[in-house]
């Protein structure tokens, strides 16, 4: 009998004390030039519902990706060139108790661009004097994972917090080895930078004080014993 009651108590306690849960929000800032204005990313704060939820920790993960399409055409009649395409993406993100910086450079293979073969002012990115580098890009890569002070993310009732994404540098260019041609053309299509911010709130319910549990359980167990006896 006593063994049975103990098992019942444990089962009730296991159900009543909740495991922690997560709330995840993701926002992405998109840029196509380093002349773009800052982008504000707005997230919901953690609403503790009058103190009935406990914020255990806040995690902020930041990733970025970038790229463009590059094509080149040498129009110099006398100078050939070994050339590669290049992109650079640099940015910062600032939020409550978070500061992140990211930078990435992608270089293409080096390509030999011969002297102009007659297309002159017409843009013609075909060999022997032109090349199509295609997509010059990097896929999403992590730029930092932060555990900021929870107090900056928690409100009693609905609220919002802002992150500011600032693009510092977006370069899409050619790098000539040796003396560059005097005349050449570069076509840049679809330049982009994406900076993704994810905010995760890990929380749990406020534990009910032990005395309250024991009182409630005592009533329930007493009733159970009475039913068993009857
Ligand atoms: Ca040419
Ligand atoms: Ca040309
Ligand atoms: Ca040509």
Image (cartoon, rainbow, N blue to C red):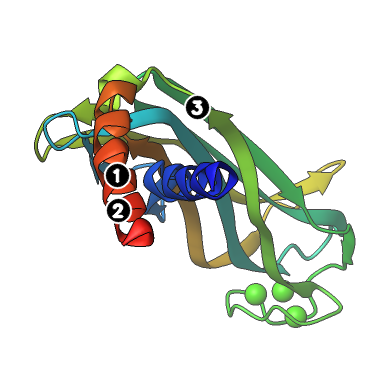
Point 86% across, 78% down: residue: 128
Task: Indicate which disc, 2 or 3, sits on the residue closer to the N terminus.
Answer: 3
Discs 3/1, front: 1
Residue 206 seen in the figure: no
Q: Is ligand 2 less than 8 Å from the beta carbon at label 2?
A: no
Q: Are marks 2 and 3 in contact (CB under 8 Å)?
A: no
Q: Are marks 3 and 1 in contact (CB under 8 Å)?
A: no
Residue denoted by label 3 = 100
* Tag 1 secondary structure: helix
Residue denoted by label 2 = 226
Residue 163: x and y in percent read 30, 34
Discs 2/3, front: 2
Residue 111: x and y in percent read 88, 63
Q: Quadrant of residue 184?
A: bottom right
* Tag 3 secondary structure: strand
Residue 217 seen in the figure: yes
Q: Is ligand 2 less than 8 Å from the beta carbon at label 1?
A: no
Residue denoted by label 1 = 222
Q: Are marks 2 and 1 in contact (CB under 8 Å)?
A: yes
> Is 184 above or below relative to 6?
below
Q: Quadrant of ligand 3?
A: bottom right
Q: Label 2: few (<14), some or many (≥20) within 10 Å?
A: few
Residue 188: x and y in percent read 55, 65
Point 34% across, 30% down: residue: 55
> Is 61 above or below relative to 73?
above
- Work out whether residue 164 or residue 117 is closer to the camera in this orientation and state it: 164
Q: Is residue 226 left or right of residue 119?
A: left
C-alpha distance separating marks 3 and 1: 58 Å
């Amino acid at each position: 009998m006593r063994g049975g009651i103990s098992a019942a108590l444990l089962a009730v306690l296991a159900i009543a004390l909740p495991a922690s849960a997560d709330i995840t929000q993701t926002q992405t800032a998109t840029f196509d030039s380093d002349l773009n204005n800052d982008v504000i990313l707005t997230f919901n704060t953690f609403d503790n519902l009058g103190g009935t939820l406990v914020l255990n920790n806040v995690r902020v993960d930041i990733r970025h990706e970038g790229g463009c399409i590059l094509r080149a055409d040498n129009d110099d009649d006398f100078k050939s060139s070994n050339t590669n395409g290049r992109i650079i993406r640099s940015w910062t993100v600032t939020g409550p108790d978070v500061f992140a910086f990211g930078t990435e450079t992608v270089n293409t293979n080096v390509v030999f661009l011969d002297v102009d073969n007659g297309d002159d002012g017409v843009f013609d990115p075909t060999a022997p004097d032109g090349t199509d580098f295609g997509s010059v890009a990097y896929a999403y890569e992590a730029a930092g994972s932060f555990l900021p002070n929870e107090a900056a993310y928690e409100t009693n009732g609905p609220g919002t917090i802002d992150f500011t994404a600032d693009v510092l540098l977006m370069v899409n260019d050619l790098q000539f080895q040796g003396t560059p041609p005097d005349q050449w053309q570069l076509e840049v299509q679809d330049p982009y930078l994406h900076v993704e911010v994810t905010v995760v709130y890990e929380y749990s319910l406020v534990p009910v004080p032990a005395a309250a549990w024991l009182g409630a359980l005592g009533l329930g167990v007493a009733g159970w014993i009475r039913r068993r006896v009857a």
